[in-house]
Image (spheres, grey):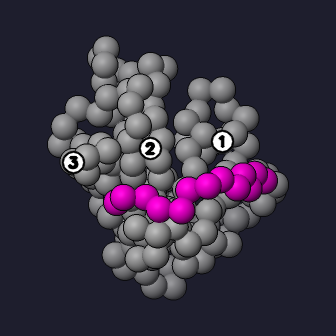
Amino acid sequence: MKVIEKQRNSRMCILCGMDNEYGLKAPFYNMEDNSVGTLFTFDERHQSYPGRVHGGMITAMLDELGFRAYWVFEPQVLAVTTSLETKFRKPVPYGVPLKGKGIVTMSNSHFVKSHTEILDMDGNVLASADLNYIKLPAERITDADYHEEMCYYIPDDVREIDI
């Protein structure tokens, strides 16, 4: 599927933060079907049992994909998670390339719903989630300058993701 635009990365987010030594530094892309996609690799620091990624890290990535799917439409509006339901379908390994997809299933003036998936490179769904968010002004979420946190735009050559 064709990449339309790359989203910004933050400084310290565990998933996209470029200055977080434990983070994934995952890139996120707006896709031609109005979804968001990513290519990333968990590492050993993200494990639960040996060879497997911790469920909290899996859920965090699914949550990030759900919110970033909303940014395809309104990149300046923030929201916070109100609920999520994660389904762990197969073990998620670390040390191997993975891909993720998120798509908005409903949006109105106050709420957003998304569906997200983490897949292996063969397209097998390893985990999925259905998420609900409430839209809030930045000052209700953080005292910090949110736009300063989302300071990294790092161009790359990704033009397509098979999701």
Q: Amino acid at mark 1?
A: Gly
* Pick the front one: 158 or 152: 158
Q: Residue at x 39, y 48 (%)?
A: 99
Q: CA distance from mark 3 to mark 2?
A: 19 Å
Q: Residue at x 19, y 37 (%)?
A: 90
Q: Amino acid at mark 2?
A: Ala
Which image quarter is the C terminus in?
Answer: bottom left
Q: Nearer the viewer, mark 3 or mark 2?
A: 3
Secondary structure predominantly adopted by residues drawn in magenta: loop
Is 91 in the magenta?
Answer: no
Q: Quadrant of residue 140?
A: bottom right
Is 154 in the magenta?
Answer: yes
* Pick the front one: 108 or 148: 148
In the picture, the disc for residue 66 is: none
Q: Nearer the viewer, mark 3 or mark 1?
A: 3
Q: Is residue 81 above or below residue 20?
A: below
Residue under label 1: 17
Q: Quadrant of residue 4?
A: bottom right
Q: Position of residue 77 (x, y in %)?
A: 63, 72
* CB contact under 8 Å: marks 3 and 2: no
Lateral position of residue 54 relative to residue 152, left or right: left
Lateral position of residue 152 relative to residue 77, left or right: right
In the picture, the disc for residue 60 is: 2
